Image (cartoon, rainbow, N blue to C red):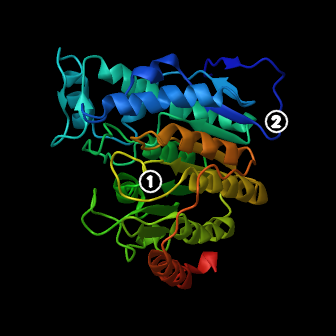
Amino acid sequence: MVNLTLRRETKLTYGDSLGIVWDERFREISFSHPMIRDVSKSRIVRFRELVSTLNVYFISPKPATYEDLLEVHDESLLRKIKEVSSLPYIGFLDSGDTVHYPGMFDDILLVAGSTLTAIFMSRFFDSIYIPLGGFHHATRSRSMGFCPINDVNLAISRLMKMGERVALVDVDAHHANGVEEMFYDKPVLKINIFAYDGKFFPGTGDYRRRGKGEGTGYNFNVGLPLGSADDSFQEALRLLDVVEDFKPSVLLVVAGVDGHKDDGLKSLNLTTNSFNLLGLKVSRLARRVNARIISFGGGGYGPGSAPSMFSFVKGLMGNRSEDEMPTQDEEKKAYVKKLVDLLLERLPSSLE
């Protein structure tokens, strides 16, 4: 049994409910490059302030165990992370992106435990949101891209072991290479929407990679041209129809907000409106297929990060809002439309 604390003034209800996994330690956790760690932390702090104005529940997470992480990571990687987290200085786990710092391993266990807590508590809520989560780049044996471990893979693996039918919608400026690698041959529906030119980090995400074995046809990569705007993003969201055909019991959503137009790692030209629309669409979709939603905050490194996270959460709660002037690029939109049409033409027989 997981020991949890729910904090809210009103009585717990089961309809239209949103749980936020939150620990005060989240304010100080960042695995990003030292130059943007403060920016990364500030978006979590600001999000907490914003979301407190909504009628939500706060759920206290229980840390994961070392054995939980072994479910999706090699012991050699975990030993390495544990060793460097005891060092009295800041360094890197990879070629210069993913930082390590004193005491980091305890923070990793808290992050992974937040995912497991969300899974346990999802039976009580329509949606659960983990603002500090969505570390989708790490592979079984390698930390990368600000991701020491992969909590999304842990969620998928644990849910599949529980017999759940899992779909993932991953929206982020960067392709979820770690998830694709681990579940490429598994019957998990994976829809990735990200910035792509073949070189932009992590360089993966070719639309022709559609899965293999039991996963054939279940991998969808929608690489948005760099600088794509709200209209292109809305075109990409047409792929959510595939989720409805798949009929998952659990819908995982990585709602990374580093595609916002003011992000420090500039790649896309999205406004908060796009993230709100994402939340609204997945919420309505989950209702139609009777799925629970577990969502992650993903990346975000600019002044628009916290408002974008807040806007997504409002969408999850059924509230449509357009707080910024929409962005457009007809040429990029036309490209995305063709790409989505192509992907929809090549569905596995179980989704036709």
- Residue situated in front as seen by the camera: 212 or 199: 199
Q: Are marks 1 and 2 in contact (CB under 8 Å)?
A: no
Residue at 33% across, 49% down:
265
Report the side of 214 relative to 101 (left or right). right
Above or below, comparing residue 328 to residue 111 in the picture: below
Report the side of 156 relative to 93 (left or right). right
- Tell me residue 87's x, y (percent): 17, 17
Give me the C-alpha separation between circle 1 and circle 2: 36 Å
* Residue 21 can be seen, yes or no: no
Report the side of 14 relative to 226 (left or right). right
- Say what amino acid the circle numbered 2 marks: Tyr
- Tell me residue 158's x, y (percent): 52, 42
Q: Residues within 10 Å of mark 1 (few under 14, many from 20)?
A: many
Secondary structure type for disc 2: loop
Res. 344 image quadrant: bottom right
Residue at 54% across, 56% down:
168
- Say what amino acid the circle numbered 1 marks: Lys
Q: Residues within 10 Å of mark 2 (few under 14, many from 20)?
A: few
Secondary structure type for disc 1: loop
What residue is shown with label 2? Answer: 14
Above or below, comparing residue 335 to residue 68 in the picture: below
Q: Quadrant of the N terminus?
A: top right
What residue is shown with label 1? Answer: 261
Res. 19 image quadrant: top right
Residue at 64% across, 80% down:
352
- Tell me residue 183's x, y (percent): 42, 58
- Tell me residue 227's x, y (percent): 39, 64
Q: Which mark is residue 42?
A: none
Q: Nearer the viewer, mark 1 or mark 2?
A: 1
- Residue situated in front as seen by the camera: 40 or 216: 40
